[in-house]
Amino acid sequence: MAVGAGAAAFRKRRDVLLYCPIMHTLLSSAQLAEGIDRLAAAVRHDGGRPPLTVIGVLTGSIVVVADLIRRLAGPVRLGMAWASSYRGTATAPGRLDLRLDLLPDVTGHDVLLVDDIFDSGRTLEALVGELHGRGAARVRTLVLLRKEGRAEVAMEPDFVGFEIPDVFVVGYGLDFDGQWRHLPYLAALDADDIARAGPAPAAARA
């Protein structure tokens, strides 16, 4: 990359970062903690045959999974699956890619599949099918967020933390172009933030 192009990219990324403090907060850290408490209680109440195998969907669910499993009654097994449909600065899901080499053996196990957000629903639908195909005795699904009016599948998550409007959100594990996962609250990314980051790569557009 030429020096001039690199400097321009740096300036563009710095401009985006400067917008972070003015994003609209949708859910505070206290509200998120209450939501995780509520979800964990619902999972415990629903029962199941121990040990419960919790499968987190990388990368967005890592904070949710970490907070959730500490509130569950043991024993709990933990595994991960990688899924991606958002790339770079894309704000709409594109092609769904899965990597399942981190999955534990789920044959005969009660599985809880945990994701950060239920948007189109294609990720959960595909992963539920994979887990059943690998012999899971039961697969339940839990999402922190369900976005209104975006579902493209008939399935519904078993446990939902919060319903949110159709906006692009960051924080508490969710990112935009690899940034802002670390925020302890959930925030809506303003349209100006997205525009300043530049157009999504053509391959990432749905």
Image (cartoon, rainbow, N blue to C red):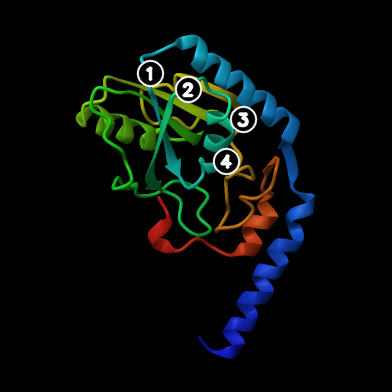
Query: Between residues 161 and 9, which one lies in front from this camera angle?
Result: 161
Q: Residue at x 31, y 29 (%)?
A: 128
Secondary structure state at the residue bearing disc 4: helix
Q: Amino acid at mark 1?
A: Pro
Q: Nearer the viewer, mark 4 or mark 3?
A: 4
N-terminal of the pair, mark 2 or mark 3, is 2
Q: Which residue is tagged 3? A: 164
- Residue 18 vertical placement versus 143 (above, below): below
Residue furthest out toward the right: 22
Picture coordinates of residue 119, whole percent (x, y): 48, 35
Distance between mark 1 and mark 4 Cα atoms: 23 Å
Amino acid under disc 2:
Gly
Is label 2 in contact with label 1 (beta carbons under 8 Å)?
yes
SS under mark 1:
loop
Label 4 sits on residue:
63
Inter-mark Cα distance, 2 to 3? 31 Å
Q: Comparing marks 4 and 2, which lies closer to the viewer?
A: 2
Q: Which residue is mark 2?
A: 74
Marks 2 and 1, the one that precedes in the sequence: 1
Q: Nearer the viewer, residue 113 or 167?
A: 113
